[in-house]
Image (spheres, rainbow, N blue to C red):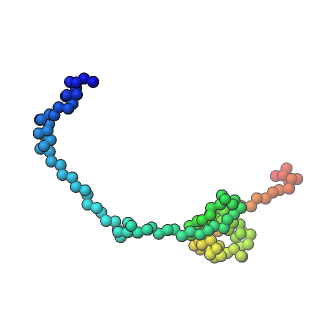
Amino acid sequence: DRPGIREEICRKDDRLLALLKDVYVESRDPPVQVKDGGGEHLPCKQEEKRLTKLGHLGDLDVKKVAKGKISIVEALTLLNNHKLHPQIWTAEKIAVEYSLELKDVNSLLEFFIPFTVQEFPKETKKAI
C-alpha cells in the first residue's frame, strides 16, 4: 500500500545487474542411455491364461488364471479327487488337466494333504 516500498521493489540495482552479466551458465542434457536390445517400443509378451474349472461359488470364483498356476478352488478339488481316487487322478493326469508342471503337482500332492472331518455319534461324545 505504501508508494515508497513499491518504488524500491521496481527499482533496478545496477551493481547486481553488472554482477549477473558476468555469470555464464551452460546447460546440457545428459546423453541418452540405450537399454539392452532397444526393445522399448516392442509390446511385452502377454501371459498365457486359461479358463478355470469353476467351483460352487459362481460369481466369486476366479475365471482365468495364468498357465502353470491354479486357483484355490481348483487346488482343493484336485487334492480331494486325488485323495478319493488316486488311481484315476494321478499326478500326470492332474498336470495335463490343469496345465501344470509335473514336479509342481508332485510337490503339491506330497505336502498339501486335505484333512477329513469325522463326526462322532452323540453317545460317544461323553466318552471322548
Location of residue 9 with respect to 105 vertically, above or below: above
- Tell which of 124 and 90 is nearer to you: 90
> Split into 4 quadrants, where in the image is the N terminus?
top left
Q: Residue at x 60, y 72 (%)?
A: 99
Quadrant in the rendering for residue 115:
bottom right
Location of residue 44 with respect to 87 vertically, above or below: above
| Position of residue 91 measured from the top left corner of the image (x, y, whole percent) | 64, 74
| Position of residue 88 measured from the top left corner of the image (x, y, whole percent) | 71, 76
Q: Residue at x 16, y 34 (%)?
A: 12
Q: Residue at x 66, y 58 (%)?
A: 60
Image position of 92 (left or right of 15): right
Does the rendering let one see residue 86? yes
Q: Residue at x 69, y 63 (%)?
A: 55
Quadrant in the rendering for residue 78:
bottom right
- Tell which of 45 and 107 is nearer to you: 45
| Position of residue 103 measured from the top left corner of the image (x, y, whole percent) | 58, 72
Does the rendering let one see residue 127? no
Image position of 43 (left or right of 106): left
- Tell which of 41 and 86 is nearer to you: 41
Quadrant in the rendering for residue 34:
bottom left
- Tell which of 94 and 16 is nearer to you: 16
Image position of 11 (left or right of 61): left
Location of residue 14 with respect to 125 vertically, above or below: above
| Position of residue 74 measured from the top left corner of the image (x, y, whole percent) | 65, 65
Counting the numbered discs, the total is 0
